[in-house]
Image (tube, rainbow, N blue to C red):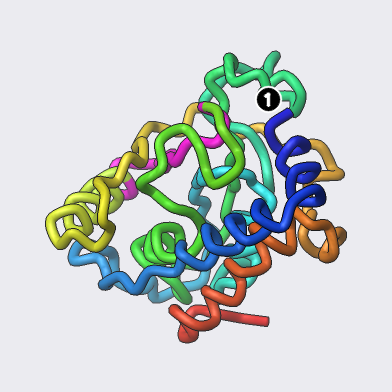
């Protein structure tokens, strides 16, 4: 398994540790607000958004610390129900991506601001079918939109960031309709909280929370 292999390699070599730290820290990017977004809603409600950006442990942890987000769940999107299982998805042949379903209050945070978090600190949107030490289509960068409004905002923001050359390379994030979201096994939920000292978490995911607080302090919550 790529993820388990990364943990072993991290334990075995100082070089691997340094590279993982560098990769995670490099993901902090100061990016502009989206030009196309929706205003804050006038009434409180619950809306969902689904993002894929490498290992779902770190992406989930980031959105758990975003103001206006009530829940972030690790799971699978992009494939069929009968293949939505961790070790099957790990084959890279199911069409699934490790994903995170974010439930948020649109009266507190907009979809565009969630995208800002996604692109700025949750992952590197210029890496194709991988994130850092994790390689395969199951680790691809993707936005699974639940309605046409989310699609328009996501596509517009990607074009805006590419035009502004915010990243040194072109964004490769897939924008696709959400057909289904399958919640991952219970041991994957709140993984960072439950395994804060695991080497993979320390060197790949903890820096993302530091970057969220540093780059987007107005959106960070403890």
Query: Which residue extends farthest left?
Result: 163
Residue 194 appears at what percent x and percent y?
Answer: 86, 60
Which of the two residues, 204 or 71, is positioned nearer the viewer here? 204
Residue 130 appears at what percent x and percent y?
Answer: 50, 37
Task: Check the picture and name the quadrant holding the C terminus.
Answer: bottom right
Q: Does the magenta run of residues contain 149?
A: yes
Which of the two residues, 8 or 131, is positioned nearer the viewer here? 8
Name the residue at 63% across, 44% down.
55
- Position of residue 1 relative to residue 56, above or below, is above
Residue 161, picture quadrant: bottom left
Q: In the image, 20: left or right of 218?
A: right
Task: Check the picture and name the quadrant holding the N terminus.
Answer: top right
Q: In the image, 38: left or right of 118?
A: left
Asked whether the viewer can see residue 72, the reply is: no
Residue 103 appears at what percent x and percent y?
Answer: 58, 57
Residue 32, picture quadrant: bottom left
Q: Does the magenta run of residues contain 7?
A: no
Name the residue at 41% across, 65% down.
120
Residue interval drawn in magenta: 137-150
The residue beneath circle 1 is 90
Residue 82 appears at what percent x and percent y?
Answer: 70, 14
Which of the two residues, 67 or 87, is positioned nearer the viewer here? 87
Q: In the image, 202: left or right of 136?
A: right
Q: Residues within 10 Å of mark 1 (few under 14, many from 20)?
A: many
Name the residue at 38% across, 65% down.
116
Asked whether the viewer can see residue 214, the reply is: yes
- Position of residue 13 relative to residue 96, above or below, is below
Name the residue at 20% across, 52% down.
156
Which of the two residues, 9 or 48, is positioned nearer the viewer here? 9
């Amino acid at each position: 398994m790529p993820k388990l292999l990364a943990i072993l390699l991290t334990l075995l070599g100082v070089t691997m540790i340094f590279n993982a730290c560098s990769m995670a820290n490099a993901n902090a990017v100061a990016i502009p607000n989206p030009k196309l977004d929706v205003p804050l809603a006038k009434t409180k409600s619950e809306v969902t958004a689904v993002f894929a950006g490498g290992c779902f442990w770190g992406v989930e942890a980031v959105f758990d610390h975003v103001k206006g987000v009530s829940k972030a769940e690790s799971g699978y999107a992009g494939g069929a129900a009968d293949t939505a299982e961790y070790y099957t998805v790990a084959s890279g042949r199911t069409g699934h991506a490790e994903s995170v379903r974010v439930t948020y209050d649109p009266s507190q945070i907009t979809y565009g601001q969630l995208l800002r978090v996604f692109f700025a600190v949750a992952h590197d949107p210029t890496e194709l079918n991988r994130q850092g030490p994790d390689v395969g289509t199951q680790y691809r960068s993707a936005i699974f939109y639940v309605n046409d409004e989310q699609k328009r905002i996501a596509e517009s923001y990607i074009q805006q960031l590419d035009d502004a050359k915010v990243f040194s390379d072109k964004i490769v994030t897939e924008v696709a309709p959400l057909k289904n979201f399958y919640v991952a096994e219970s041991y994957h939920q709140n993984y960072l909280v439950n395994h804060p000292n695991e080497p993979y978490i320390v060197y790949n995911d903890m820096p993302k929370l530091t970057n969220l607080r540093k780059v987007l302090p107005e959106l960070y919550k403890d």
